[in-house]
Amino acid sequence: MLAGWVNDRCRRLIGGAVVAACCVFAPSAGAADQAPDAAPGIGAEKFFSALVKVHTRALPDARSADTLGTDREGTGIVIDDKGLILTIGYLIVEADQVDIVDDHGHTLPGQVVAYDHSSGLGLVRPLVPFKASPIPLGDSDKLAETDPVLIVNDGGREQATLAYVVSRRPFIGSWEYLVDQAIYTSPPTLNWSGAALIGKDGKLLGVGSLILRDATDADPHLPGNMFVPIDLLKPILPELIRTGHRSGPARPWLGVVADEVQGRLIVTRVSPEGPAEQAGLKAGDIILAVGNEAVRSQAEFYRLLWGRGAAGSDIPLRLLQGVDVHDINVHSIDRIDYFRQKTSY
């Protein structure tokens, strides 16, 4: 019912030549001639010029090819006056070639600037001059349930959709990934990878990551999307631009994909040639403990894993393999060291 109501409202509020954000959030402001409230006087074309398509081709021997494919495509968001583009990180992991397609359909060569596994965000930049008005960064911490938001991808105004925040809670990924206070929206939108989540003030609040069946925490579960909050980027943006990664020690990474099943943490996949596989873990193993502390959930596992020190630490695991219990040590690494690197970066 909610999805139908919102979709109907979107159709009425967002027209072909209308700036969607202004129309939704400020319907009396002359939306056809203005961009969102955060940038009064900036025309529609300049607003939508900040949304580009990011197309990447992975390295021939990319370790991420099995799970992410070799050809990847999503949205990028221009966030500074030098053409720096923010996107979701899985699009650019192990990228061999980066192409940026602007809102006029022109294809520009690009390069990876940074990838941050902890947040899941990535930065790219065109290699030729690129004119676009950046979208300012907002304050995602203030975003609350029931707040209206606009989701805009590289399809521009034709694909801009109105949604609502339906939950603010952690997102826990089975691939050693956790985002505190992730932003969940509904109804779901397609072409979500790297999509911009725009607030009522026209500022960027999040970057699209996933489509989900359960965007709401409690029944009735509504389908929707998960966005990485922009506040995760702001403290680390200068160092990402300067060095390509955040400063300080990296988290330990094992290369384990594990799911919670009836109070047990079952390994469903191990990264080929990763630390876990080299230590003897395999699909079907059950992780019972980290050291002497029992684990029954992904969140417990990550808390104990990341609390053991920086990447390079030995992580003691207790496993149930078949009918036998084994204690093993896994020598962790920085996840970025696992991926193949293009030497020209």
Image (tube, rainbow, N blue to C red):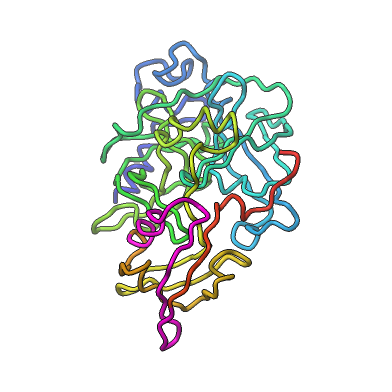
The quadrant holding residue 304 is bottom left
- 137 on left or right of 154: left
Compared to residue 179, the image places residue 276 above or below, namely: below
Number of residue marks: 0
- 198 on left or right of 311: left
Compared to residue 50, the image places residue 214 above or below, namely: below
Q: Residue furthest top?
A: 41
The reply to whether residue 185 is in sight is no
Residue 196 horizontal/vertical position (percent): 48, 35
**Residue at 52% in and 30% down:** 16
Residue 147 horizontal/vertical position (percent): 29, 35
Q: Nearer the viewer, residue 29 or 209?
A: 209
- 100 on left or right of 39: right
The quadrant holding residue 327 is bottom left
**Residue at 56% in and 38% down:** 245
Compared to residue 228, the image places residue 1 above or below, namely: below
Residue 114 horizontal/vertical position (percent): 59, 37
The magenta stretch is 300-326
Q: Is residue 200 magenta?
A: no
**Residue at 62% in and 48% down:** 93
Q: Residue furthest bottom?
A: 323
Q: Is residue 309 magenta?
A: yes
The reply to whether residue 266 is in sight is yes
Residue 62 horizontal/vertical position (percent): 69, 56
Q: Residue furthest left?
A: 219
**For the C terminus, which image quadrant?**
top right
Q: Nearer the viewer, residue 31 or 320?
A: 320
**Residue at 75% in and 43% down:** 343
